[in-house]
């Protein structure tokens, strides 16, 4: 048989496999999150309670009838009303005498971890972007050759350190230092965001440097030949030329920061609270997921999957944006 | 017509950082005002190295070594100054505004056509919109590309054809009213029609500037230039009026090269 054809088929099926994988993850997340989605709807995004048990007083007969009705038709409405919880309808023991039953239900909301994720990522980006740009400009334009090599290697090594080590270092050395300088709690959104920023810094700097290095020498020389200074060449030639690559590097770093678990877990405090101050502890989506899967009941499980689904959409959107920029640059 | 010197290269030698031997040895070359001086020679003989010494572009890279003099006429003072003495950044900037350079491949900046031409002017501190407009138009006309660009000045220069881009680069250099323009094989990446346009442009430009052009196309050298320097492995073998070099070379090596026996 034709080798060309076999090659084509293999390549095609590998490509298909990736798509299938992507789709199956999406579907898995969606299906697992579906119960929580129907239960909480979009209100999940703004609900700041997590695992709060609320009591509901109601008629026993009504409760039962509701229960059977629920299991009878599973066509769920997206915004389920308050007194028809799906899972934890449980009769409290010890009040058999009365006809009244105390039911409870547990409310899960994603607001705190979503905000925690967004804020810690934002802090990380605000902190790391200017420094990464500075390092990249230094390495590609200013530093003498003898420095470029070792610093370049150091940056690549830093980028290769597992994030858990950044987390440990952050907890034991960096957070106390920040506390001394800024005050507030060692365990906080701020320290988590900063350590996250430090973690993505080498990655961003390395990719930005590579993007800047693609600027052809003659282009720079042309600008110098018109009387440009080094600063003007960086600003007017290198940044615009490497713009697509630089934006790409920022967006990829952003994607990494959004999904980071370990470095953040050490420092964010795992407290379901979001307060006005950045120096108090909070929690982020990946940390909620990592901490809670072990002992989750079905309802919580579904809520966790809902959170995972939101994280997936966030990251996916950002990477899609990056790809969009890369593709646009190729044109 | 009296010949007036604009530049005088004396005993110039150049060695790249880390290179085992010099790429240029004891070069002596006069450059006359409002004339075209061509540099020819086989690939790797040092033409670009010499050209790039004249606006000190080499100094963007560290540790090159050079000796000798490259004297450039200071028109106000009417005296020669050795550009190899330049050390301060603002003096480099002034030098490069006086000595423009066009490269082998067109090098449009990733910005609009207008901004490309205005770039050097803006760097030199010119801000007035009306004067900028005027100078950009004049430069584009000077580079014979005004008609093609006047309706698309705000469009990106990256969308132009290679020949147009090269003329844009010439316009960009011309806009600064340099005293000398250096061309390093400006047509080697272009098609014959664009090449012809650029050649015509260069011969028109010599009314305003002095020109040094590197080319490995001998027809181009003989068509365009007033003087020709033949170089070979880092040395200047022969320099004379172009017709003398091509019709009656003194050196055997020159004769062999222009008759196509090697190179
Ligand atoms: N950046 C550089 N570093 C070291 N050697 C170089 C460099 N550029 C050119 N050379 C060497 O210098 C010599 C002259 O090169 P060049 O001036 O580019 O020749 P031409 O322009 O005449 O083809 C060649 O031997 C070349 O290998
Ligand atoms: Mg060359």
Image (cartoon, coloured by chain):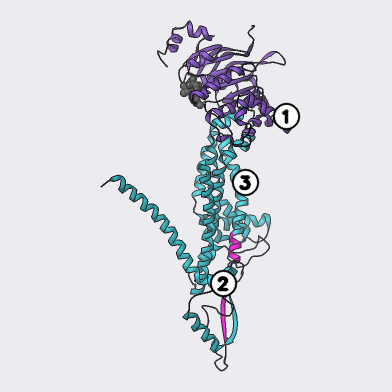
Instruction: Please rate how many residues cluster around mark 3, counting C-alpha atoms within 10 Å: few if below 14, some from 14 to 19, many from 20.
Output: few
* Quadrant of the drawing holding the C terminus of chain B: top left
Question: Of circles 3 and 2, which is in front?
Answer: 2
Question: Of circles 3 and 1, which is in front?
Answer: 1
Label 2 marks which chain's residue? A
Label 1 marks which chain's residue? B
Q: Nearer the viewer, residue A149 or A236?
A: A236
Visible residue check, residue A218: yes
Considering only vertical position in the picture, is A292 above or below B20? below
Q: Position of residue A29 (x, y in %)?
A: 47, 65
Q: Which residue is mark 2?
A: A40
Do discs 2 and 1 belong to a common subunit? no
Residue range of the region highlighted in magenta in the rendering: A100-117
| Element type at mark 1 | helix
- Count up the numbered dots: 3
Q: Position of residue A160 (x, y in %)?
A: 49, 49
Q: Which chain is cyan?
A: A
Considering only vertical position in the picture, is A61 above or below A118? below
Picture colour for chain B: purple
Q: Which residue is mark 3?
A: A130
Question: Of circles 2 and 1, which is in front?
Answer: 1
Relative to A220, A180 lies left or right: right
Disc 3 or 2, which lies upstream in sequence?
A: 2
Q: Nearer the viewer, residue B253 or A277?
A: B253
Visible residue check, residue B22: no
| Element type at mark 2 | helix
Q: Nearer the viewer, residue A85 or A228?
A: A85
């Amino acid at each position: 048989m034709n080798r060309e054809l076999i090659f084509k088929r293999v390549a095609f099926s590998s490509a298909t496999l990736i798509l299938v994988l992507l789709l199956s993850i999406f579907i898995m997340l969606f299906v697992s999150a579906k119960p929580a989605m129907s239960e909480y709807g979009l209100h999940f995004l703004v609900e700041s309670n997590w695992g709060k048990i609320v009591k509901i007083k109601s008629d026993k007969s009504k409760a039962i009838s509701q229960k059977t009705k629920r299991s009878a038709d599973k066509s769920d409405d997206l915004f389920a009303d308050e007194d028809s919880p799906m899972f934890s309808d449980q009769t409290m023991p010890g009040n058999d005498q009365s006809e009244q039953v105390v039911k409870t239900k547990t409310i899960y909301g994603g607001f705190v971890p979503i905000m925690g994720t967004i804020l810690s990522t934002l802090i990380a980006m605000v902190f790391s972007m200017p420094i990464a740009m500075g390092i990249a400009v230094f390495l590609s334009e200013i530093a003498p050759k003898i420095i470029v090599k070792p610093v370049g290697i150091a940056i690549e090594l830093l980028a290769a350190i597992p994030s858990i080590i950044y987390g440990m270092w952050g907890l034991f050395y960096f957070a106390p230092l920040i506390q001394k300088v800024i005050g507030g709690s060692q365990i906080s959104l701020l320290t988590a965001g900063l350590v996250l920023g430090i973690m993505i810094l080498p990655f961003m700097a390395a990719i930005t440097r590579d993007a800047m290095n693609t600027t052809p020498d003659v282009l720079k020389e042309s600008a110098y030949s018109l009387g440009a200074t080094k600063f003007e060449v960086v600003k007017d030639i290198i940044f615009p030329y490497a713009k697509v690559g630089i934006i790409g590097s920022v967006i990829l770093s952003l994607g990494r920061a959004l999904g980071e678990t370990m470095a953040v877990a050490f420092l964010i405090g795992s407290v379901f609270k979001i307060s006005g101050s950045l120096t108090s502890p909070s929690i982020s989506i990946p940390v909620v997921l990592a901490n809670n899967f072990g002992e989750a009941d079905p309802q919580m499980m579904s809520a966790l999957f809902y959170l995972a689904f939101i994280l997936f959409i966030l990251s996916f959107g950002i990477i899609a944006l990056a790809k969009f920029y890369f593709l646009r640059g190729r044109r | 017509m009296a010949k007036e010197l604009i530049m005088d290269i004396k005993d110039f030698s150049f060695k790249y950082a880390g290179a085992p031997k010099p790429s240029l040895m004891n070069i002596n070359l006069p450059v006359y005002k409002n004339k075209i001086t061509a540099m020819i020679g086989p690939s790797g003989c040092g033409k670009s190295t010499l050209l790039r010494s004249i606006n000190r572009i080499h100094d963007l890279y560290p540790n090159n070594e050079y000796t000798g003099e490259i004297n450039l006429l200071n028109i106000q003072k009417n005296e020669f100054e050795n550009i190899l003495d330049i050390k301060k950044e603002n003096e480099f900037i002034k030098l490069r505004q006086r000595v423009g350079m066009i490269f082998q491949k067109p090098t449009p900046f990733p910005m609009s056509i207008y901004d490309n031409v205005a770039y050097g002017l803006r760097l030199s501190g010119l801000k007035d919109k009306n004067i900028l407009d005027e100078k950009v138009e004049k430069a584009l006309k000077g580079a014979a590309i005004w008609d093609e660009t006047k309706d698309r000045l705000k469009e990106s220069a990256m969308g132009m054809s290679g020949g147009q881009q090269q003329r844009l680069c010439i316009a960009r250099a011309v806009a600064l009213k340099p005293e000398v323009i250096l061309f390093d094989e400006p047509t080697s990446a272009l098609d014959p029609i664009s090449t012809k346009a650029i050649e015509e442009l260069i011969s028109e430009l010599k009314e305003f500037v002095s020109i040094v052009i590197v080319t490995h196309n001998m027809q181009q050298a003989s068509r365009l230039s007033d003087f020709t320097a033949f170089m070979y492995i880092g040395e200047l073998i022969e320099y004379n009026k172009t017709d003398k070099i091509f019709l009656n070379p003194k050196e055997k090596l020159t004769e062999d090269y222009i008759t196509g026996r090697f190179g």
